[in-house]
Image (cartoon, coloured by chain):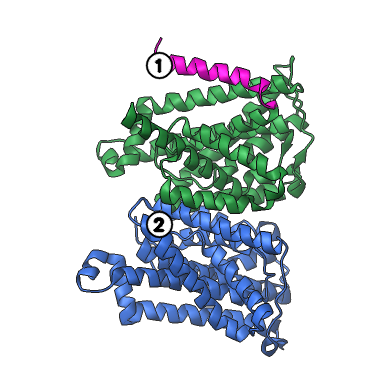
Chain colours: A green, B blue
Amino acid sequence: MSKVNRNLIIAIALLAIAPFVLYPVFLAKVLCFALFALAFNLLLGYAGILSFGHAAFLGTGGYITGWAMLNTGMSTELAILLGTAAGAALGAIYGKLAIKREGIYFAMITLALAQLTFFLYLQAPFTGGENGMQGIPRGELFGFIDLTNNLTMYYVVALIFLFGYAVVSRAIHSPFGQVLKAIRENEPRAISLGYDVNKYKWVAFVISAALSALAGSTKTIVFQLASLTDVHWHMSGEVILMTLVGGVGTLMGPIVGASLIVTMQNYLSTGEMGNYIHIIMGFVFVICVLSFRNGIVGQWNKFKAKNF
Amino acid sequence: MFDINLFALSGQLLIGLINGSFYALLSLGLAIIFGLLRIINFAQGAMYMLGAFCALLFLKWFGMSYWVALFVVPFVVAVLGILIERFLIRPIANLDHLYSLLLTFGIALILQGSFTHLFGSSGLPYSTPAELKGGMKLPFMYLPNYRAWIIASSVVICGLTWYMIEKTKLGAYLRAGTENPQLLQAFGINVPLIITLTFAFGVGLAGFAGVLAAPVYSVAPDMGSNILIVVFAIVVIGGMGSIGGAIITGLLMGIIEGLTKYFYPEASATVIFLVMMLVLIVKPAGLFGKEG
């Protein structure tokens, strides 16, 4: 059995056992954010593009899925698909605009576009403004799997997460992913080799936006809530932090980072330390950038390469 | 076609000009820092917030008047800028500039989080200096003195900065450093010092804007992050090619925002972002941008 298959089986086994050790809804939250960070890392880690506006896609997935569940009576999987499609469509438009500029301009443009999205959702009649969209039913998957059971819900989220992981993993190990890495390492060279660099970046951006929206849609179903928190610029910052802590440009990094940050937030929000959460996140940012740029997984890979 | 109420329109235009004055000061600071350091300072909004809070706290602690604060606070903020540049930004100056962007974002989170923790998230009032209370009655509108003062002082500071950079010896060093720092260093100019001072000056401008803003907006921890994202859009619209461009675009966007508030208030929060989208389609390098 190859090493990749062995790791995959271990991972699936862990996902299957986990809800018997930890609270399923917490695990579902971790997996949603892990998927979000995976999607984000496809851009930053493999194409070298920093998006500062990914909250727009997470939030769009959540709001559109929530709207569909509340108003159309469609089954859960269709509502999630609709949310994902909406995120992909928004990503297609924003991606087209943002890839006209590079580097820090790209970051500023995506941040500004995400802020535009924030205001649109704040003012739109269907989102409930500051109160958010509440009481969204979980519904039934394919019309017969009842999702009100937290354990069932968790396994559905785990499957969605595995699907997202497979998409990202397939993308970066394909010729498409190789071109992305070439762009990251040396863009002028990729251009001179005849690649339509902007098209590759745009496709990566749309995939990333779609998966982020998938994460947002799923999260909305789990928590039965869609709110402005998910479109706020803080959220765009959080996903960057998750990726940075875990390890930019590694497949496992965003998953490790998301688990860590979500655990930290859950732990802090219940205790006295809740007020300090943004200060702590700021310090983690500064420390990571100054002296821990490889992240946990990157550092581990380095350690392994040296010692084994 | 429109039933134009001149009184209300000029009122909104005035508010637009005031917002534009702050946009101009902040985007000018960003452009100066970007010119030499090639980084975008995400903490610029936090420095603006810090400026407003310093004015408030110095009044409370030392009884420092508005006029003294207007001179002292920018220096305090600039000193913090020197420390940040020297000890945090410089060690990673040779890495990809995305790292310095993330670093300054972290600093902004720390500052905003700390002030929220200490003073709560709702705003605190800072009273208008006695000398500038009251206002003038113009034929078509009422102009409060303090608002006139904001516009005038912002235009003067922007003008002086423009003059210093474009017309003086120090400005020539700065522009040379933007073009080719190695060569400038070879001529015996202390480039690292110039970089530090430039950063300090850029954030000092934000501190100045903060003091100026304290009497008109309530002093709140999130006052900086909200305005900064708009200023980013303005920087994209104007392009960072020129100092004058940053100033003009800032004022212009303030006016456009004011006009939108009058004609179609629902879009006033989003109009600048929409202009940014339009500019990206028509002229991606920005109105004053040089790079392709």
Chain letter of disc 2? B
Query: Which circle, 1 or 2, is nearer the viewer?
Result: 1
Rendered image quadrant of residue A149: top right
Which mark, by number, is residue B285? 2
Q: Give the range drawn in magenta.
A: A1-24
Task: Please tell me whether mark 1 sits on a helix, a strand or a loop.
Answer: helix
**Principal secondary structure, stretch drawn in magenta:** helix
The answer to if B32 sits in the magenta stretch is: no
**Residue B137 appearing in the image:** no
- Residue occupying the point 45% across, 70% down: B202
Report the amino acid beneath label 1. Lys
Residue A33 pos. (x, y %): 59, 35
- Is A13 inside the magenta-drawn segment? yes
**Residue B52, x across and y down, in percent:** 62, 72
Q: Work out which residue is located at the far bottom of the displayed protein and give it.
A: B131
Q: What element carries label 2?
A: loop
Find disc 1 in the rendering and name its residue.
A3
